[in-house]
Image (spheres, rainbow, N blue to C red):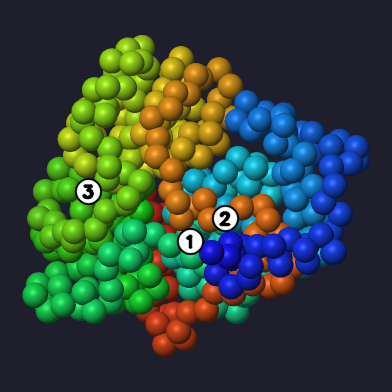
Amino acid sequence: MVQLINAMTPLEEARAILAENFDLKFSKAVETETAPIFERVRDRIPEIEWPFFAPLIHQINRLKKEKDAVILAHNYQTPQIYYGVADIVGDSLQLAVEATKVTQSTIVQCGVHFMAETSKILNPSKRVLIPDSRAGCSLASSITAEDVMAMRAQYPGVPVVTYVNTSAAVKAVTDVCCTSSNALDIVNRVEGDTVIMIPDQYLAQNTARKTHKKIITWAGACEVHETFTADDIAELRAAYPSAKIIAHPECPPEVIDAVDYAGSTAGMIDWVKTQKPPRVVMVTECSMSDNVAAENPNVDFLRGCNICPHMKRINLENILWSLHTGTEEVTVDPAIIEPARMAVQRMIDMSRKGD
């Protein structure tokens, strides 16, 4: 089977073209220029690997300026992307908000496909690139716009709150979006005593326990978080009795009950920064743990994570290829851009309100 650098181009073909157009040798100048970055990630990236990453980082940072591009990276991206080339980092809500502020003509989305669609929805006049369009999401693929319309017909008049981990088509038939950080607030703000909350069943179940409203769910789940169990948490406690264990609300409720803190991506990061536990296990995606560890050198981070195979489709090579070739460009049907944008914008507006 031929390896591809993205959904279209053979890896070896792309590598040959990149080698013709960019100096990807690890020179003394590149080493010096990237030294501050390596100092931040040296505990997360083996020194022997840096000569491969550093020239790519150098060329990406040079080329994005030349191409008038900004790089948005989710917290689940690897440290060499998160600290090496990203201009804006954050969780889904943070990236959605920041996407509305960028001035560059091109957005490179280092995340999964629905995030790139969201950037395009919020910036229809800008070019949005994703280094590999195969970077999907189990939640986004679990529900269609037709499924949402069927639920609306079954529960007429009930507002639909949709997790941002969904396609543009699903967002377009939604009343308002939410993220894990604002799900409870959004549910409480929409009208009525009943809410359809889709597609993550566990986020919905964990939210339902904190609100007086009735929540109707969908049987979707994040493949990174749904596999964690209460037994896993018990094993972690037995192995690391002094460690604090924190988790994401996409985990099943029995996992949330067993940990020391549960919160959104941003919430987990803030908890570590403020609580400063001597030892911590982050029950989430592994690269997030690596990125938070780089900012908290006095906290001992222990492994208890899963890898998101979709996020890991994005790497330095295909980011450079994306900038060089202008691929893969993300498009959204013009007919659904405005209704999808309104659902995302309502989320942003509600999140800004303090009343």
* Closest to the observer, 95 or 77: 77
Image disc number at residue 27: none
- Kind of residue at badge 3: Tyr
- Which label is found at residue 314? 2
Up/down of 278 relative to 42, above or below: above
Horizontal placement of 36 versus 70: left or right?
Answer: right
**Which sits earlier in the primary sequence, circle 1 or circle 3?**
1
* Residue highlighted by disc 3: 202
On the image, the x and y values in percent for residue 306 come to: 40, 39
Which residue is located at x 27 percent, y 45 percent?
Answer: 226
The label number, if any, that marks residue 135 in the structure image: 1
Q: Gap in Å between the C-alphas at discs 1 and 3?
A: 22 Å
Disc 2 and disc 1 in contact, CB within 8 angstroms: yes
Does residue 101 lie above or below 240 as drawn?
below
Q: Residues within 10 Å of mark 3 (few under 14, many from 20)?
A: many
Figure quadrant of residue 153: bottom left
Sequence-first disc among 2 and 1: 1
The amino acid type, in three-letter code, at marker 2 is: Ile
First of labels 2, 3 by sequence position: 3
Left or right of residue 12: residue 258? left
Instruction: Point out the frontmost of discs 1 and 3.
Output: 1
Residue beneath the point at 53% across and 56% down: 313
Q: Amino acid at mark 1?
A: Ala
Residue 302: x, y in percent? Answer: 44, 23
Compared across the picture, whether 67 is left or right of 161 comes to: right
**Mark in front: 2 vs 3:** 2
Q: CA distance from mark 2 to mark 3?
A: 27 Å
Question: Residue 199 appears in which quarter of the rendering?
Answer: bottom left
Residue at 78 percent across and 66 percent down: it is 17
Name the one closer to the observer, 87 or 43. 43
Residue situated furthest front in the rendering:
1
Name the secondary structure under disc 3. Answer: helix
